[in-house]
Image: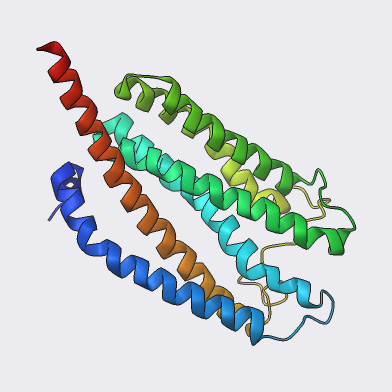
């Protein structure tokens, strides 16, 4: 079986229809378990107090904000190279989900940063690149909405996605590039000194799994909606020509 079989819209919808209930159930279980475990059954941090528990929303949403754009990049490249419409529609479907994840990351980061840094916002390299990434999400969605021809819109948004990928990568690695930033290092790291303590680490992994499953379920659902909307527009266009 080839992955390219799922470029067929009927095959894609049929397969994702079977997967979505499992993905949604898994997301609900992981998010419920992870957030309850993290917020109610982990201790306060000796430095940050109870504020540290924002990590269970901030880190997964920030991780998905970046990876959502990377997923859009892959889908856009598939469209450019192989002209599979499902991939272009999947990239379009992922954009609002990624934008919401980015907004959650920015908001929770501000809430977390205020007691730690004494300010809601700082022009830190990672924060700034994340804000620019959010603006790229808005621009991407606006460009899709502004162009009537779907193929032309897919071409132009794919180019925009390539450019925005620079800021997605900067959002992830800005701390490594510019050491003078206020933002802490990665919460999940192979370096034991930098990685969060196990008491926070394991519920965080459960929350991340929940965010990943939720993202996949929402992208599948929105891609199905985009496919059906494209079909409806095609049918209306045919009727208008008669």
Residue displayed at 62% across by 54% down: 104
Q: Is residue 45 above or below residue 115?
A: below
Q: Nearer the viewer, residue 149 or 5?
A: 149
Residue displayed at 43% across by 76% down: 29
Across and down, in percent, residue 239 comes to: 13, 19
Q: Residue furthest right?
A: 118
Query: Which quadrant is home to the C terminus?
Result: top left
Could you tell me if residue 83 is visible in this image? no
Q: Is residue 28 above or below residue 178?
A: below
Residue displayed at 20% across by 50% down: 13
Across and down, in percent, residue 112 comes to: 76, 62
Q: Nearer the viewer, residue 63 or 54?
A: 54
Residue displayed at 45% across by 62% down: 212
Could you tell me if residue 119 is visible in this image? yes
Q: Is residue 87 above or below residue 147?
A: below
Across and down, in percent, residue 189 comes to: 62, 69
Q: Nearer the viewer, residue 74 or 134?
A: 134
Query: Which quadrant is home to the N terminus?
Result: bottom left
């Amino acid at each position: 079986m080839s992955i390219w079989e799922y470029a067929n819209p009927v095959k894609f919808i049929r397969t994702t229809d079977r997967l979505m209930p499992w993905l949604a159930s898994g997301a609900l279980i992981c998010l419920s378990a992870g957030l309850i475990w993290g917020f109610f059954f982990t201790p306060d941090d000796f430095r940050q107090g109870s504020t540290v528990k924002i990590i269970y929303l901030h880190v997964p949403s920030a991780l998905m904000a970046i990876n959502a754009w990377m997923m859009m990049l892959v889908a856009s490249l598939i469209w450019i190279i192989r002209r599979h419409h499902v991939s272009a529609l999947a990239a379009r479907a992922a954009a609002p989900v990624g934008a919401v994840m980015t907004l959650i990351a920015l908001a929770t980061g501000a809430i977390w940063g205020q007691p730690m840094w004494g300010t809601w916002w700082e022009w830190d390299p990672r924060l700034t690149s994340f804000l620019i990434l959010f603006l790229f999400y808005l621009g991407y969605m606006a460009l899709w909405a502004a162009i009537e021809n779907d193929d032309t819109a897919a071409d132009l948004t794919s180019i925009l996605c390539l450019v925005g990928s620079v800021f997605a990568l900067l959002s992830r690695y800005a701390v490594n590039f510019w050491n003078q930033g206020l933002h802490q290092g990665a919460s999940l790291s192979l370096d034991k000194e930098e990685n969060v303590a196990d008491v926070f680490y394991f519920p965080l992994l459960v929350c991340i799994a929940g965010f990943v499953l939720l993202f996949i379920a929402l992208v599948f659902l929105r891609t199905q909606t985009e496919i059906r909307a494209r079909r409806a527009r095609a049918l209306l266009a045919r009727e208008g020509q008669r």
